[in-house]
Amino acid sequence: MRMATHHAEPGEVVDLQTWAADLPQEHTKAIVKTDKMELIRMVLPSGKGIPNHKVLGPITIHCIAGKIAITTMGDTREINYDQLIHLMPGEPHSVKAIEDSVVLLTIVFSN
């Protein structure tokens, strides 16, 4: 039986480096999920990624460890540790880890 994942409570301090430490292996894990937004700590091993897709709301993709490549708006951009990119709603994009990486993804839902 799988237990529900813990989401951060309002006012709870979140350590982004250890947020998924409760999982048997380091995996992607939602930090906060509400009807207005979702905050996800994503683990991307080198060479792995997320194929081209789009989301309805604006997003930020913040590299908190490693290095990733974001392909969007006809260009591929490298995002290094402690850099981020903001995309508008519906903007197609893909993500690929250049090296083992941890990404903080924020999605704002358009209602």
Image (cartoon, rainbow, N blue to C red):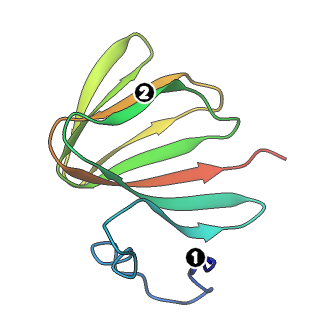
Mark number displayed over residue 42: none
Q: Which residue is mark 1?
A: 5
109 vs 25: above or below: above
Q: Image height check: is 76 above or below 60?
A: above
Left or right relative to 35: residue 5: left
Look at the image and tell me in which quarter the N terminus lies: bottom right
Choose the circle earlier in sequence order: 1 or 2: 1
Classify mark 1: helix, strand or loop: loop
Rounded to the nearest angstrom, the CA distance separating label 1 from label 2 is 26 Å
Name which residue lies at 47% across and 25% down: 93
Bin the neighbour count of mark 1 within 10 Å (Cα to Cα): few under 14, some 14-19, many 20 and up.
few
Q: x%, y% of residue 106?
A: 53, 54
Secondary structure of residue under mark 2: strand
Vertical side of 38 occupied by 77: above or below: above
Instruction: Identify the residue under disc 2.
Output: 94
**At 35% from the left edge and 35% from the top edge, which residue is drawn?**
49
Q: Identify the image quadrant of residue 26.
A: bottom left
User: Which residue is located at x 27 percent, y 73 percent?
Assistant: 17
Viewer-closest of 75 and 94: 94
Name the amino acid, label 2.
Ser
Give the x, y percent position of residue 90: 65, 26
Q: Is residue 37 left or right of residue 80?
A: right
